[in-house]
């Protein structure tokens, strides 16, 4: 009997997408103070000029957006929106999460100078 589609997708995610010899990088990061290290894909979407109200006079601050793809088996739980995520010297906030076939997709935002 063959493997069902869901099992096949999860196997492919582990063997290819979350494999540091293929697509992923073994990275260290923190979510809400908990340290994680493992095969993830961290995609910085780029820096955007931030929208600011006329009463905000803080110039030179930009918004950075990124997406983090991590295996649920690494995280053990689905992080909630609003939690802090630390990568190196940059602190992000989870703005949204999705879960697909054993993978957690976190959309992140940060403000930098």
Image (cartoon, rainbow, N blue to C red):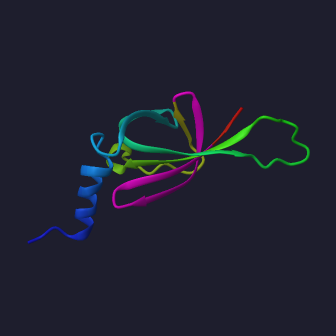
What span is colored magenta in the figure?
88-109
Q: Residue at x 52, y 37 (%)?
A: 32
Residue 66: % across, % down: 55, 46
Q: Position of residue 93 (x, y in %)?
A: 60, 43
Question: Residue 78's spot in the image, x, y percent?
Answer: 44, 51
- Kindly tell me whether residue 75 is visible in this rendering: yes
Say if 97 sits above or below 109 in the image. Answer: below
* Camera-side residue of 19 and 95: 19
Quadrant of image for the N terminus:
bottom left
Q: Is residue 33 left or right of residue 5?
A: right
Examine the residues drawn in magenta and state their main secondary structure: strand
Residue at 38% x, 43% y is 40
Q: Quadrant of residue 36?
A: top left
- Which residue occupies 37% across, 54% down? 103
Residue 96 is left or right of residue 2, and the answer is: right
Magenta-drawn stretch contains 98: yes
The residue at the far top in this view is 89
Q: Horizontal and vertical percent for residue 31? A: 49, 38
Residue in front for this viewpoint, 49 or 71: 49
How many numbered tags mark residues here? Answer: 0
Residue 18 on the magenta segment: no
Residue 35 seen anywhere in this rendered image of the structure: no
Q: Quadrant of the C terminus?
A: top right
Closest to the observer, 64 or 91: 64
Identify the residue at horizontal 30%, vertical 40% (top origin). Answer: 20
Residue projecting furthest to the left: 1
Image side of residue 85 versus residue 48, left or right: left
């Amino acid at each position: 009997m063959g493997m069902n589609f869901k099992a096949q997708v999860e196997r492919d995610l582990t063997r290819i997408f979350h494999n540091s010899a293929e697509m992923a990088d073994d990275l260290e990061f923190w979510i809400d103070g908990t340290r994680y290290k493992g095969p993830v894909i961290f995609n910085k979407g780029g820096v955007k000029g931030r929208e600011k109200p006329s009463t905000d006079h803080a110039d030179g601050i930009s918004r950075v957006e990124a997406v983090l793809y991590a295996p649920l088996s690494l995280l053990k739980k689905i992080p909630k929106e609003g939690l802090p995520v630390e990568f190196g010297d940059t602190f992000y906030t989870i703005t949204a999460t999705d879960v697909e076939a054993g993978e957690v997709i976190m959309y992140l935002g940060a403000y930098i100078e």
